[in-house]
Image (tube, rainbow, N blue to C red):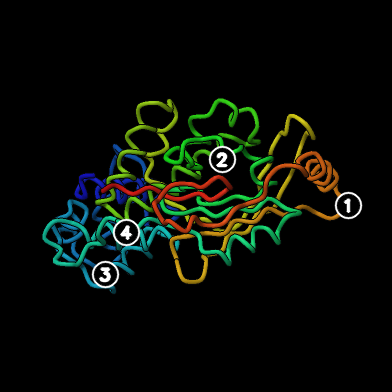
Amino acid sequence: MDRVKEIAGFLRSRRAGITPEQAGLPFDGRVRRVPGLRRDEVARLAGVSSEYYTRLEQGRAGNPSAEVVAAIARALRLDDTEREHLTDLLASAPGSGAATRRAPTRVQRVRPGLYLMLETLDHVPAFILGRRTDVLAANRLARAVITDFEVMPATQRNMARYYLLDPQARQRVGDWEQIAAETVAMLRFEAGRYPHDRALADLVGELMLTCPEFPGWWNDHRVLRRTHGEKHYRHPVVGELHFSYESFQTPGDAEQTLCVYTVQPGSVSAQGLRLLESWTATAPEVGVPSPQGDGHADAGSYFTSHEPH
């Protein structure tokens, strides 16, 4: 991706979302041709010169100090994720002089202890996501509630690809548009961290060409982390399922995320989940890593993320 265009697009989208009234600026009598704040207004709020902010938005300001980034973030009311994304973009801009994160080359593998944890969490859906929302492992109920990632080719086991490209997802995932848009925002955050990740660029290119909604979501420059929230599924066997979910970075690998879905005890969703648990009781559980370490899935539920060579 063109980092200069990324910086400009992100900052323009953020200042377009803030009105002068929201920023506490008095009406100056000028006709506004675009929504939101002007560059000079952001500069004034951040305490920098208009010329400097213009250079920064154009990707020509070098590597600004942490204090300047913090001032811009306050002026644009960025949340923590947006501020980190801006820092990533500025650090990888041409002429910044900052060290850019290299593209990931290490194949992601789930260690045995985490597989045992997924087996322990056998009464709720649980799965592990890696870079680019690759599905690295999933327990039986996660495969039953969301989709059976085991039947997919290893290179297709990806949550964003499922949500955005699988026709079944549009029917099964409640609030599909919201969930899909949030997934795109997570991909965009990761793209800011790893601008040279070829596999991520290929995934974005595929989604850009094959998902009609993707370009609009991608171009609004929204960024999100996986944290916690609500999920709703319409299962063909047990009906409506409403979950709360929590996401945790796994110890030893900050780029792996354990996601756990829970239900309110005694709720209709809890009853449906117990029925689904009984219905899938004969399905194989999550497996363990292949001792060969060849980067391929074994006969069980061992998933691996494939990186470019």
For the residue carrying disc 3, how many other residues have a C-alpha within 10 Å: few (<14), some (14-19), or many (20+)? Answer: some
Determine the secondary structure under disc 3: helix
Q: Quadrant of the N terminus?
A: top left
Q: Is residue 100 above or below residue 65?
A: above
Front residue of this view, candidates 68 and 151: 151
- Across and down, in percent, residue 191 comes to 33, 50
Horizontal side of residue 306 vs 198, given as left or right: right
Label pair 3/1, CB-CB below 8 angstroms: no
Which numbered tag is attached to residue 86? 4
Q: Earlier in the sequence, mark 3 or mark 2?
A: 3
Mark pair 1, 4: CA separation: 44 Å
Q: Is residue 166 above or below residue 19?
A: above
Determine the secondary structure under disc 2: helix
The residue at which mark 1 appears reads as: 266
Label pair 2/1, CB-CB below 8 angstroms: no
Residue found at the far right of this picture: 266
Image quarter for residue 41?
A: bottom left
Residue at position x 27%, y 45% from top? 198
Mark pair 3, 1: CA separation: 52 Å
